[in-house]
Image (tube, rainbow, N blue to C red):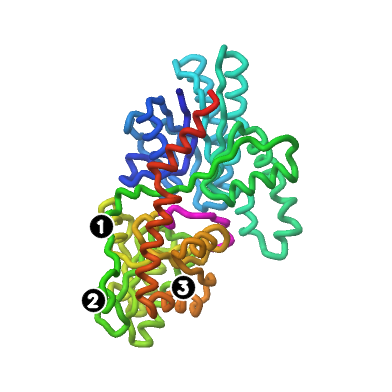
Amino acid sequence: MQIWIVNPFDQLPNETDVPLRYWTLCRMLTEQGHEVIWWSSDFSHLTKSKRAACPPTDGFTVRLIETPPYAKNISFARLRNHKAFAISFFREAMIGLKGEGLKVPDRIVLSLPPLDVAEYAFRIRDDLNQNTPNLNCQVIVDIQDAWPEAFYQVLPKPLRQTLGPLLLYPLHRRARRTYGGADKITAVGQTYVDLAKKYFARWLKGKIPPTHLCYLGADLHRFQNHHTLCTEKEKQQYTVTNKRPLQAIYMGSMGSSYDLETLIEVADRWKKEEILPWQIHFAGAGSQLKALKDTSQKRGLLNGRVFFHGYLENSAIKQLLEEADLGIVPNRPNSLVACPNKACEYAAASLPIISCLSGELEKLLQEWGVGITYKESCIDSLYHAFEYYNSDIDRLAQHSTSARIMATKLFNRDKSYRNLIQFITEGA
């Protein structure tokens, strides 16, 4: 098949050596004999800067579309970026199909967000199916985030229920059109599958198209050497009174959507209590990084209790994960994230998880016996979450084992992405 992947956000192969969802999907599709084009933006969502051209990788092609910049993830500037991406994608695709030898796609897989691309993808599909004999081009919407629902968090709380639906009506209308026009719907969380079903139940008439759940997942082969607290001697090394503290890691973006300040506050409490039960390692970059480092430096926490490693390549982040005892998911609950990438990576590395996300991830942690949820921005709650494991090393070891089991069942890309590909390509 000829398959187009339309996603402007994931890092490209020339920007990282850790494949995320769409690089993995493109590579696996190519391995199965499909021809793949990944349509992306020339503006990096992660670094907020212009991208360099990406050469063909793993047998697929990356095409970059020129778009305007934006500084904040939830902003009108980002919506303008999305609109420009959608219009330019349509224009370049139609020019390529009609005059530049671009092969007709059998499938168009597009991420949501952005909301704007879908209507143009539907126009391409409908035009091709009408004018190309024996073609069954399908558009598959892959839900990555709850849009426009995530925009409610930028509104003052008293206005969210009253003015929110009115202010965001145009975005809700686009979401309805996106779900209603899709041939199939996939999602990175059951939360998002249920959201699509709610749109059909409330606003859209007719039967919901086929749906499929595929978590962001992880490459389980990366983590074969993670240490576990198996023997009594090893467990005795990890105590409050011992010189060797437990290791906690936060891996990911360091922006305002994450409750990172509370981690520093808990580390400061340990310092005041003259104990060192945990060391906290930050791996990533973002708008909060400098302030967090400055606060840690002023309070005497830096490089003793708190460590900042910056953005790391695959081998370095793999080493940190393999040496860690616990993973932290401090995504703020109002971000509406279902099950973030870092949770999949932690579980693959056999790490129990401390999280302040409610909803789907909280249920998974409880169901699989993998972690504990704390209250966002509450120092006492996070402090006791760390103590929950520090006071019972057997529990930490047990949850480590359970994390790998959960990853094997839910997050193994070798299996889950093959199922996703089958769902995308079936019904030719």
Q: Residues within 10 Å of mark 2 (few under 14, many from 20)?
A: few
Residue type, numbered disc 3:
Thr
Residue bearing the label numbered 2 = 233
Tell me which numbered mark, 3 or 1, is placed earlier along the sequence.
Answer: 1
Residue bearing the label numbered 3 = 262
Question: Residue most toward the bottom?
Answer: 273
Inspect the magenta stretch and tell me whether residue 366 lies in it.
Answer: no
Front residue of this view, candidates 168 and 69: 168
Residue 237 is left or right of residue 180, and the answer is: left
Residue 370 is left or right of residue 129, and the answer is: left
Q: Position of residue 58 (x, y in %)?
A: 32, 32
Tell me which numbered mark, 3 or 2, is placed earlier along the sequence.
Answer: 2
Residue type, numbered disc 2:
Lys
Residue bearing the label numbered 1 = 225
Q: Residues within 10 Å of mark 3 (few under 14, many from 20)?
A: some
Q: Position of residue 364 (x, y in %)?
A: 51, 59
Q: Residue at x 53, y 70 (%)?
A: 376
Residue type, numbered disc 1:
Asn
